[in-house]
């Protein structure tokens, strides 16, 4: 198939591109490079032996989107592009609503104009809000988002559901990711955020590498087995595979559906630190600090819908995730 990936040079987009190229799909990456680098294209060529097309453009530029869809005769879009830092979204709500929501509206208009009817959207477990019970299933109502970033995901899901209702030919799959971590086993692509990382894994990786002094563990008084926060971490390669498996589904099922992508079990912050110590052979100093505002105690999903509808289930465990994240991290400049 001919597939366009908005945000395709980013963390999850680039890993998905690697698998799509290996599966002989034609891949166009459409990205404004606000949080990624064009060099990813060279890396993807080294990994897969095939070079994706890169179109440098913004999803809010409807004309440029239309051109890309038309010129490459795109059959399906995977929509990764967006801003994703929770804290920053509180500081800059307008930027987040404009980039994520307006950007998605422009993309939908461009798809309508060019007759592209299949869309996979990067949603997030954040749409469930504070869990009332675990594991989270897609039948549960979405919750109250606690920050502008989360609200963009919730609103976009609803906008997509409305559009699918209005156009019986439109086919939309919202993949609700839990906590993606890890890197490609080659070590050539991975996650290396600008500035101080907000998320646990890139932070732990930098401490292991000596780029940061110690991990701050946000609270050890949660109602969890060791008191630290529990999350459903998922290897980015498993997540990427989920998109590949969602393609035949999305191209053949009109309507709108949400599907969880997670492992279905949680690990605590301390378990993650221990697993990373094992993977890296480094001691990882940490200190317990107060809870981070807006954090929930525990979060994990029920991935059985993905297994039933897509034939997908996660294959990698926390040790695999830490091993691959460490390989990528240790190949970076110190
Ligand atoms: P990322 O920042 O690495 O990738 C996003 C890409 O989108 C970047 O390459 C960026 O340059 C591009 N982009 C941003 N705004 C754009 C615009 N207006 N036009 C064109 N390109 C634009 O992030 P990621 O971790 O790969 O996340 C991909 C998607 O998955 C995002 O929508 C994110 O919200 C969602 N998601 C991520 C996580 C996570 O923890 N990483 C969890 C759940 C959902
Ligand atoms: C994981 C655990 C922290 C950093 C966020 C978004 C979510 C999704 C994924 C996009 C928690 C603890 C963290 C640190 C710590 N993104 N922690 N010290 O908060 O589950 O999810 O990213 O959709 O929407 O909210 O991920 O990696 O930030 O935190 O102790 O320096 O690690 O308290 O328990 P989170 P995270």
Image (cartoon, helix red, strand yellow):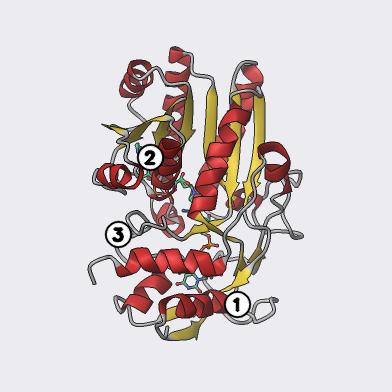
Quadrant for residue 188, please give it.
bottom left
Residue 198 is at least partly visible in this image: no
| In the foreground, 293 or 135 | 135
Find out if the beta carbon at label 2 lies less than 8 Å from the nearest ligand 1 atom: yes
Which one is earlier in the sequence, the residue at label 2 or at label 1? 2
Q: Residue at x 45, y 40 (%)?
A: 80
Q: Say above or below: 103 vs 124.
A: above
Q: Which percent across, then down, holds residue 209?
A: 32, 76
* Tag of residue 104: none
- Kind of element beneath mark 3: loop
> Mark 3 or 2, which is nearer the eye?
2
- Kind of element beneath mark 2: loop
Which one is earlier in the sequence, the residue at label 3 or at label 2? 2
* Tag of residue 8: 2
User: Which residue position is annotated with label 3?
Assistant: 194
Q: Residue at x 24, y 72 (%)?
A: 334
Find out if the beta carbon at label 1 lies less than 8 Å from the nearest ligand 2 atom: yes
In-image side of 46 versus 208 (left or right) = left
- Kind of element beneath mark 1: loop
Give the spatial CA distance, label 2 vs label 1: 33 Å
Q: Which percent across, then down, holds residue 314?
A: 61, 54
Q: Which percent across, then down, holds residue 185?
A: 41, 58
Q: Which percent across, then down, holds residue 330?
A: 32, 70
Q: Say above or below: 245 vs 148.
A: above
């Amino acid at each position: 198939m001919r597939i366009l990936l908005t945000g395709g040079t980013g963390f999850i987009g680039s890993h998905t591109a690697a698998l799509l190229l290996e599966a002989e799909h034609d891949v166009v990456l459409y990205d404004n490079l606000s949080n990624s680098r064009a060099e990813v294209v060279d890396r993807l060529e080294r990994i897969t032996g095939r070079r994706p097309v890169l179109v440098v453009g913004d999803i809010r530029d409807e004309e440029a989107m239309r051109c890309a869809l038309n010129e490459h005769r795109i059959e399906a879009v995977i929509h990764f592009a967006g801003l994703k830092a929770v804290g920053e979204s509180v500081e800059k709500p307008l930027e987040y609503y404009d980039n994520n929501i307006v950007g998605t509206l422009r993309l939908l208009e461009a798809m309508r104009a060019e007759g592209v009817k299949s869309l996979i959207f990067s949603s997030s477990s954040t749409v469930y809000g504070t869990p009332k019970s675990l594991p989270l299933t897609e039948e549960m109502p979405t919750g109250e988002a606690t920050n502008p970033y989360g609200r963009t995901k919730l609103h976009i899901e609803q906008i997509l559901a409305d559009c699918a209702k209005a156009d019986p030919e439109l086919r939309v799959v919202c993949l609700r990711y839990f906590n993606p971590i890890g890197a490609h086993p080659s070590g050539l692509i991975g996650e290396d955020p600008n500035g101080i990382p907000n998320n646990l894994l890139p932070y732990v990786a930098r401490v292991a590498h000596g780029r940061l002094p110690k991990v701050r563990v946000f609270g050890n008084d949660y109602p969890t087995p060791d008191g630290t926060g529990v999350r459903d971490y998922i290897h980015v390669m498993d997540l990427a595979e989920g998109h590949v498996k969602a393609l035949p589904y999305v191209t053949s099922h009109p309507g709108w559906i949400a599907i969880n992508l997670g492992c279905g079990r949680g690990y605590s912050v301390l378990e993650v630190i221990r697993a990373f110590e094992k993977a890296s052979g480094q001691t990882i100093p940490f200190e317990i600090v107060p809870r981070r505002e807006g954090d929930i105690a525990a979060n994990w999903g029920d991935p059985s819908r993905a297994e039933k509808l897509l034939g997908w289930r996660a294959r990698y465990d926390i040790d695999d995730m830490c091993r691959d994240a460490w390989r990528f991290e240790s190949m970076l400049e110190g």
